Image (cartoon, rainbow, N blue to C red):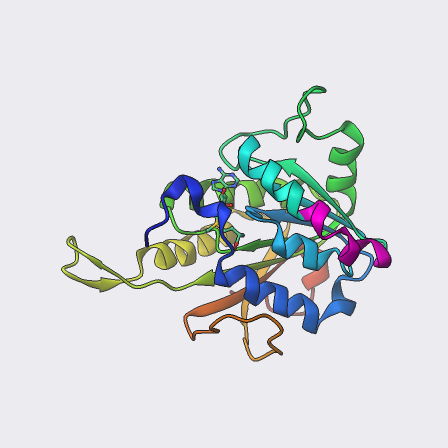
Amino acid sequence: MATPLEDVGKQVWRGAFLFADFILSQPVMFRGATVLELGAGTGLTSVVMATTAKTVYCTDVGEDLLSMCKRNVTLNRHMTEPAGGEVRVRQLDWLQHSLCTDADGEFSWTEEEVADLYDNTSFIVAADVCYDDDLTDGFFRTLYQLCSNFTHSCTIFISIEKRMNFTLRDMDVSCEAYNYFSHCLSQLHDLMDGRCCFRVEQLPSNFAQFFLYERIEQLELWKGTFSEPAAFAGSSVTW
Ligand SMILES: C[S@@+](CC[C@H](N)C(=O)[O-])C[C@H]1O[C@@H](n2cnc3c(N)ncnc32)[C@H](O)[C@@H]1O
């Protein structure tokens, strides 16, 4: 509650621990994959992911935060290098419409990386990134832009903590950010306009716990699957 919004990326949130636990309990799923993390903050989830995945694009905004994240990645290389995993810290701002490819930016993308991202990303992951409605809009817009330009199917994992707040508007306790997240998930489904299909499900959170944190019941993990319509022939597209 005391963290100013601009500094939220400088601490590890429970959603990151939950998803890191999920990776460690399902390492085969991610083995050798190309993964994009959105709103990575300290980089913990990307580092854990790179203990099994091949390339992890670990993204967030702001030189300051990205530099801290890169330091964390470097400090933890001994965890990722033995498995051949690599974390590349890059800028990806949900409020911008393109990836920064300026040659002189430390966290800019090369043309090869952009091509690799579009051609090879099989997982997009994000931990605790839906806490402000404007940012949540930007986050879902980014997801849509990325996935609708992929030539292959992609799986998305989003962890979220359903935070209850008292609001003067409702004069009651509500979970507005969570409700907006649910609303955006259903909008994303409607946006898919026949170019691809989107299925979503909440995963049970009963996998093994490796990290020390409180796995409260408000912590949730969601899985979304984007794929070509043909892949769903004969099955009902669920929502
Ligand atoms: C609550 S923190 C979660 C950090 C990390 N995933 C974790 O769970 O520990 C939200 C993250 O979203 C990032 N973020 C906020 N606005 C963003 C934007 N416009 N584009 C990309 N990332 C953004 C923040 O910098 C921060 O790292």
Near-viewer residue (22 or 181): 22
Q: Position of residue 39 (x, y in %)?
A: 55, 46
Above/below status of 128 relative to 23 = above
Residue at 22% of width from left, 64% of height from top? 173
Residue interval drawn in magenta = 73-83
- 147 relative position to 141: left or right: right
Q: Position of residue 163 (x, y in %)?
A: 35, 62
Residue at 53% of width from left, 30% of height from top? 96
Residue at 39% of width from left, 64% of height from top? 162
119 inside magenta stretch = no
Near-viewer residue (9 or 94): 9
Q: Position of residue 112 (x, y in %)?
A: 80, 32
78 inside magenta stretch = yes
Q: Position of residue 140 (x, y in %)?
A: 50, 46
Near-viewer residue (217 or 147): 217
| Whether residue 130 is visible | yes
Q: Does the magenta stretch mainly form a helix, a strand or a loop?
A: helix
Q: Residue furthest front?
A: 75
| Whether residue 148 is visible | no
Quadrant position of the N terminus in the picture: bottom left
Residue at 68% of width from left, 63% of height from top? 232
